[in-house]
Image (cartoon, helix red, strand yellow):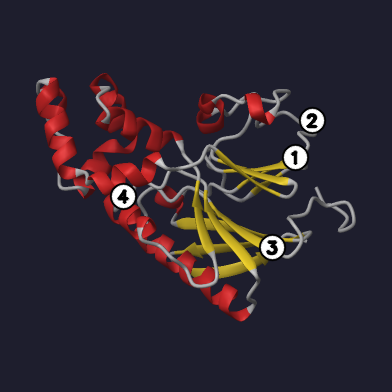
Amino acid sequence: MIFKRSSRPAGPRGRRAYAIGDIHGCLDLLDRLLEEIEAEIAERPKQKTGIVFLGDIIDRGPASAQVVERLRTYSPEGATAHFVMGNHEEVMLRVVGGETEMLPSWLRFGGAETLRSYGVEPRGLVTLPEEDILSRLRRAIPKEHVDFLQGFADSISFGRYLFVHAGIRPGVHLSEQSQSDLRWIRDPFLDDPRDHGFVVVHGHTITNTVDVAENRIGIDTGAFCTGRLTALGIEGSERWLIQAGNEGSERISLD
């Protein structure tokens, strides 16, 4: 689907945003992508530029702890970093917060890799008493990391775009959206063609290529399994992709 430039949704005047899809503990790809974004910002500076991370920075990949520390201390020149809560951050925080009954499912969908990156061997962990589980987790995962993740937003608006992790519940006003839908929804959001009043830029659902529809853009290209991490750039009515992969990086226009 192709927008005419005059009718295409736009970001706020004089501002630029980069939205980065699900990183899932892939520090090498993150470093490559940020290098490309920072080089573009240096070459084409804008008065106000934001870099928005769409959640799921942890789990599945080999370096979640290192990704969290990289982003916790990230202060790019010429831009401001913003973070959206994903379902994987939610589960990790709930487990560390005391909901140890969620530990087995977290380990199955990526938490095991995260714990190893923090120096915790997950094998046999679920058989321990609850107080021992929590003690091990809280000793290994720095409080600074927990505080950082707890500060993530549910959504971020940018002109006629909305940045969110998973999507929205169609037909429900943004102010009434549930955290669960913003972090977990797939159907009925993905197949709903209606105009939401803004274009939803999201991750959460892996696609081989960036999924561009009239009312949403999905940019989770499965970094941990495809070796390809994607960012969407928006400035005015212009949109473009920057992708970092094992074979190098490239910039792709969406015009």
Residue pointed to by mark 4:
64
Residue under label 2, please give it.
194
Q: Are marks 2 and 4 in contact (CB under 8 Å)?
A: no
Say whether disc 3 or disc 4 marks the residue closer to the N-terminus.
3
The three-letter code of the residue at mark 4 reads Ser
Q: Using the image as rendered, state which of residue 113 and residue 141 is in the foreground.
A: 141
Neighbours of disc 1 within 10 Å: few (<14), some (14-19), many (20+): some
**Tag 2 near tag 1, CB within 8 Å:** yes
Q: Secondary structure at mark 1?
A: loop
Nearer to us in this view, 178 or 195: 178
- Rate crowding at label 2 as few (under 14), some (14 to 19) or many (20 or more) other CA atoms within 10 Å: few
Identify the secondary structure beneath mark 2.
loop
Q: Which is more foreground, mark 3 or mark 2?
A: 3
Q: Which residue is mark 1?
A: 215
User: Which secondary structure, mark 4?
Assistant: helix
Pointer 1 with pointer 4, Cβ within 8 A: no
Mark 3 vs 2, N-terminal side:
3
Could you say where residue 106 lies in the image, as x and y percent from the top left? 31, 30
